[in-house]
Structures are given as C-alpha cells and as structure tokens.
Image: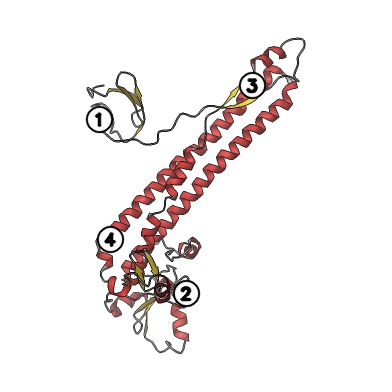
Amino acid sequence: MAVSGRKFSDFQGSISNGSAEDFDHRCEPCLAIGQQIEAHGFCVDCQEYLCKNCFAYHQRTKASYHHQLVNKDNMGKHVVPAKDSGVCTEMCRDHKTEVIKFFCPNHEALGCHDCMTMNHRTCKIDYIPDKCSGIGDSAEFREVMRELDQKVNEAEDVLKLASCREKELDSCHDRLLKEIALFRKEVNDRLDQLQKQIQTDADKKKFTDQQAVKKVLETCTSISSDIKQLQSRLQDYKASQQNGQLYITMKQAKSKLKSDEIKEAGRSLETTNMQYTFEQNQDLKKTCFQDKMHLESSQCRLVTTKRRKSVDKLTHKENIYIRTKSAQKIRYIRGCVVRSSNKLVAADWNNEKLKVVDIKTKLY
C-alpha cells in the first residue's frame, strides 16, 4: 500500500512564503496546511501564533472575536509551555474524510481506520498517538535525518556530474563544428550539402544525449527538492512538537529513502557518449584537389568513438597512502588506471599531478 504524502506542488506555497527564513515563531494555522509564515501576534486563549491575516481573521469571527490577542512584542509573556502532542491531522489520501492514525509495520504503510480494516485486517497495527511520544528525540528520527542528508549529498553529486557532462556536450559539439568548417574550406564550396548533413547528424546526436542529461538534471533536482522539503517538515514538526505529523512524515521520508531514482539517473547518465570526433574522408580530399571531382560517390560521416567497457563492480581491498610532504591536502583522486607489472597511475585533482604507485611495495 502506498504511503500517503504531499506532492511537490503542495510545497510551492511554503517556498514562496519564506520556508527558508529563520523565524522565531511561525503561524500555526498556516503551518497546518504546509505554509510557513512568520508570526505577527499570539492568541492567549488558543495558545497559537498567528500571521497578519490569521490575526485579523481571528478578530472578526464569532467563535474567537472575544479571545485575548497580543502583538508580536508581548507574545512570549503569554505562552504556556506546550505538551507532547500525539494529535494526527493529515487526511488520508484514499479516504478524504478520515485522518491517518495507523501504521502497518509489515507493509510499511500509513493509513486511516478504513485502510487498516480493508487492507491490513490480519496485520499487527501501530496506533500512531500511542507510538509517537518522544519520537523527535528517538534514534529512528536521527537515523532518518542522517539518511536524508546522505541522499541529498548523493543527488548533488550526480547533479555536479550531470552539469559537467552538459558542458562537455557543448564543448565537443563546438569542436566538431570547427573541424567541419576547417575541412569545408579545404575542399571548396561544393561541400555545402555534405557539411549541412554532417551538422544535422551532429545536432541530432547532441540533442539525443542532451535530452538524456536534461532528464537526469530534472530528476535529481526534483528528488533533492523533495528531500529538502521533507527535512524542513521534519524539523518544523519537531520544533512545534506535532509528533503525530512528525511520525507520519518520518515514515514518508523512509519510503522516499528506498527509492532508486538517483542510482537510475546515474546509470542513465553513463549511457550518454560525449566523445565525438570528425573523421575526414581522405579519398574525397584527394579527389577535390584534382581537376575532375566525383562528389556523387564520395561520403563524409560523423563518427562516434567506441565506448570503453564499463566496470560493473569495484571491490575495496585496502588503502594506499600517496600524499607527499610538499603536496597540498589530497581531497580528490579523480581517476586511476592499473598498468602492467603492478603499477597504478592515480590522478591527483588538487595538486594537478599524476602519481605512479607500485601496488605491491606501496612506493611511488
């Protein structure tokens, strides 16, 4: 059973209303619908922080116009310390009038009473208000936050790689067009038609690979944004001690962590081929400089270099210390190649050096 949760579009209002701002207090009615707006005042009777709009509305409704309201400067004087709240407020996605109050550990599914009755009758069900006490200080909460941070880092790593690939595409394409133009000048104006065909092939190839890279960028951007939204919600629910919502959002976050979208995006990125070269037709070149030229039987072509065989799996065996006394701190070994006779060549990115290491003796 799918875990219910808000879609990315539900958080656009939150972003536009300053979810990243460091507010001392947020409007609690707005927070309940996913928006984060700075508190403008406080209702002593409701014990709720209110934004400007909610503050004004509070004074107009019959149910609350007699409540005691205080401005921003006096809010702290009337706040009663909040108790641990196990109240669940998120509505079930399948049963719109029911509140999510249960979690099935067997299927890792959140749901309302109807969901559990219909789909989890034989399962051992957790009642969220009974289970969520102190969840914000639990090891599970800390583990979810740690894994979310790790997932964001993974997404950002793939984003950086995708951005580099995108630049390589442009650079490779520009270089290709220059080579074509140079060859074009050598053989004269009769190559107009062939040049256009080569450029068309190059553009098609670039477009195909660029679409693949663009899809990876969009996917990773969306995943990173979703995870950051989850992190923000988790922190806010913890701060406001809405433990029911905190419990639900944690389970949603754990479901998100199991997604393989980032790895799939990385694998998709590996299938794009950035190494394009232009290969001159030597027979055509010789023919063009003769008195008679036979263009009908000549051909120019766009060549895609053969990709190196990918490595399916790398197994860690041991570490080799290759930092010299004069070198800066080594942060990145961006690549390595195993040569014959047990020699390893490592590319030191920070120090802009190639280091040859004997694998057996560990000397270089």
Taking the image as shown, residue 110 lies to the left or right of residue 326, namely right
Crowding at label 1, few (<14), some or many (≥20) Cα neighbours within 10 Å?
few
Q: Which residue, given by chain and number where applicable, does mark 1 sit on?
A: 320
Give the quadrant of residue 120: bottom left
Name the front one of labels 2 and 4.
2
Q: Earlier in the sequence, mark 3 or mark 4?
A: 4
Mark 1 and mark 3: Cα distance apart in space: 47 Å
Q: Is residue 7 above or below residue 170?
A: below
In the depicted view, which residue is nearer to us: 143 or 102? 102
Quarter of the image with the N terminus is bottom left
The secondary element bearing badge 1 is classed as: loop
Q: Which residue, given by chain and number where applicable, does mark 4 sit on?
A: 140
Mark 1 and mark 4: Cα distance apart in space: 36 Å
In the depicted view, which residue is nearer to us: 309 or 58? 309
Query: Which residue of the protein is positioned furthest toward the front in this rendering?
Result: 122
Mark 3 and mark 4: Cα distance apart in space: 63 Å
Picture disc at residue 95: 2
Give the quadrant of residue 283: top right
Q: Is residue 332 above or below residue 5?
A: above
